[in-house]
Amino acid sequence: MTEHTADQPELLTISEAAEVLRAPVATLRY
């Protein structure tokens, strides 16, 4: 992964949150 924490930290946070939440959200849906 490229280091863009200084340029766009929000995008990385959103991406990480999406991946982390994707698992529990999928479990709740099913």
Image: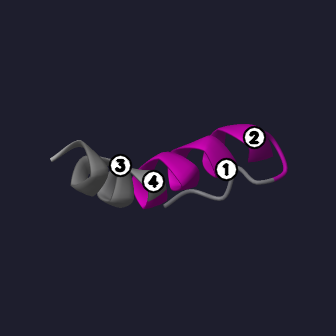
Region in magenta = 6-20
Of mark 3 and mark 2, the one earlier in the sequence is 2
Which amino acid, by three-letter code, is at mark 2?
A: Glu
Residues packed near mark 2 inside 10 Å, few (<14), some (14 to 19) or many (20 plus): few
Residue at image point 77% right, 47% down:
9
Q: Amino acid at mark 3?
A: Val
Distance between the Cα atoms at labels 4 and 1? 12 Å
Give the residue pinned by disc 4: 21
Q: Residue at label 3?
A: 25
Residue highlighted by disc 1: 13
The residue carrying mark 2 is 10
Disc 3 or disc 1, which is closer to the eye? 3
Amino acid at dot 1: Thr
CA distance separating discs 3 and 2: 21 Å
Q: Which mark is residue 26?
A: none
* Magenta span: chief secondary structure: helix
Labelled pair 4, 3 in contact (Cβ < 8 Å) = yes
Looking at the rendered structure, the secondary structure element under dot 1 is helix
Q: Is residue 24 magenta?
A: no
Tell me, what colour scheme is on the image? one colour
Disc 3 to disc 1, how far (Cα)?
A: 17 Å
